[in-house]
Image: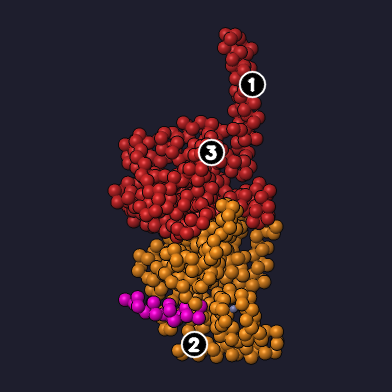
Amino acid sequence: MLLDFEQPIADFESKLNSFKELNAKNLENQAIQQAINTFEQELIKLKKETFENLTRWQRVQLSRHPERPYTLDYLENICEEFIEIHGDRNFADDPAMIGGFGTIEGQTVMFIGQQKGRNTKQRQYRNFGMANPEGYRKALRLMKMAEKFDKPVVCLIDTPGAFPGIEAEERGQAEAIARNIRDMFMLKVPVICIIIGEGASGGALGIAIGDKVLMLENTWYSVISPESCSSILWRSWEYKEQAAQALKPTAKDMLGFGLIDGIIPEPLGGAHTNPKETFDTVKKVIIDELTKLSAASPQERILNRIEKFGKMGVFVE
Amino acid sequence: MSWFNREEKNIKTQTTEKKETPDGLWYQCPSCKYVMTTREHKVNHSVCSSCGHHERISAADYFAVLFDDNTFTELDANMSSGDPLTFTDSKAYPKRIVATQANTGLKDALRTAHGKMNGIEITVSCMDFSFIGGSMGSVVGEKIARGIDNAIKMQTPFIMISRSGGARMQEAGYSLMQMAKTSARLALLAEAKLPYISLMTDPTTGGVSASYAMLGDFNVAEPNALIGFAGPRVIRETIGKDLPKGFQTSEYLLDHGFLDFIVKRTEVKTKFTQLLSMLKP
Ligand SMILES: [Zn+2]
């Protein structure tokens, strides 16, 4: 699938490919080779121009790209081993929130994240990455288990929001998220949170209290989705571009506000255009950050965590 | 009880003034249409004496419900919102703030005070729904955080009275992080072993319910308040079904195990006093 701003690049790439095929048939044709070289440079230029100047709404679109890597894709590619752990020990297992112990360069880490589905059936099974209370409770159970065994926690965030349904309310969606937020502050082990796709509101924050909160380059994180914001403030779903501009939810915006700790660069063209490069980058970041965080004592980490979020806010007195 | 008599005296003065304007003499309950005098309604803390309908009241009114002689020290009274996103929808955010401040006489959607409740020192933060739907932005979050700091410093219980539609969109990411900031402080309050009573009033939804409102040692609510994570309209649109009767009311939450008890506004002071007295070290 191609987003509208990806189309010119795809057209360019197919042109380049046809030249390459031509070149393969006519070995050592200097003119064709020269054209290819020029085209390749032009392509990089076009990609850079396109992706450096994306609007906020276009970045939101990229964050939801149907080919974008999801949580389990990361785990499959960055862990040597991974054992998924299910259930909240109370009500059910939530397929929209997955977790388990994995090893990354020999080090055991508790991974937790929302999971989206790739096709219609999977999307329904994963509830579009919208967790129910049992998902948040499973997440907290796993975090506390990680703490017990002194293993760090890495959360991968990718959700359009916590599920708004009758049963979710019945089982205490608000309470589940609130408890996670509070209890994550007191975890004795290092916690790294990475927004890998969508970071929508409380549903994201419910697993996003960390010593390091990072965003991949083409993701968004805010209190509401541009569409919902549009429907409330503009009373129509049509103003999503304006809403995205107003909410300033991109990685660059959020870093500028001091609401996250860093941005993880994506391959030119977005994570989905080169998943392997994306996995390698994320893996390296996790290893580096864990090394740094392990140098501090649990008490220091907890106090820094509380202090960091305590500074967030703008007001006049 | 003596505190009740004193309060009644306060009300009398107000009613005397109101007599000059006959319109202000009567109150009709929007729920059961019962007509009572404004004085009767006020004395009853804006609760209908016929059907028990709890009218939405301000932080100032709630301070009068809780504090002895309506005497208290307000904290951070002048804190006001910034505009970190230069947010504009139909109106620029700073203009919206200034206009709302002029209309309501409030600085933002929450006030914090400390004082005595039947002799017990307490710190209270209370939301004002009339200020942009009681929405939570940086000011609300910071004032709650400092309220909790005050409770820890003065070793008082903390009482939070929520009345909010959720986070304030105009502060986007900053609003979201107020959920984190307030919850972090509540973790410290819990470490200090000080009681936290969260009183939810109509309505308590969104980011407010999914953070400090649901984190009480005691999660309690006024009768028939709307309490939930997602608003009823969003849920209806998502699932495409009508919602069950009584869904997301205080009584529904009590039934499902998410409230410790429901308390009428006229009994809040007595009940909280009893509870906190039992917890005294
Ligand atoms: Zn009535």
Q: CA distance from mark 2 to mark 3?
A: 62 Å
Q: Amino acid at mark 3?
A: Thr
Colour chain A is painted in: red
Q: Position of residue A241 (x, y in %)?
A: 66, 46
State the residue position of label 2. Answer: B4
- Asked which secondary structure carries label 3, the reply is helix
Label the magenta part by its dominant secondary structure.
helix
- Asked which secondary structure carries label 2, the reply is helix
Q: CA distance from mark 1 to mark 2?
A: 84 Å
Chain shown orange: that is: B
Q: Are marks 1 and 2 in contact (CB under 8 Å)?
A: no
Q: Label 3 marks which chain's residue?
A: A
Give the quadrant of residue A24: top right
- Find out if the beta carbon at label 3 lies less than 8 Å from the nearest ligand 1 atom: no
Looking at the rendered image, the quarter that the C terminus of chain B falls into is: bottom left
Q: Is residue B25 above or below residue B212?
A: below
Task: Give the magenta part as a residue range.
Answer: B265-281
The structure residue drawn at horizontal position 35% and vertical position 52%, both measured from the top left corner, is A89
The structure residue drawn at horizontal position 43% and vertical position 72%, both measured from the top left corner, is B261
State the residue position of label 1. Answer: A15
Q: Are marks 1 and 3 on the same chain?
A: yes
Q: Nearer the viewer, residue A29 or A57?
A: A57
Q: How is the image coloured?
A: by chain
Q: Position of residue B110 (x, y in %)?
A: 55, 69
Q: Which mark is residue B43?
A: none
State the residue position of label 3. Answer: A120
Q: Are marks 2 and 3 on the same chain?
A: no
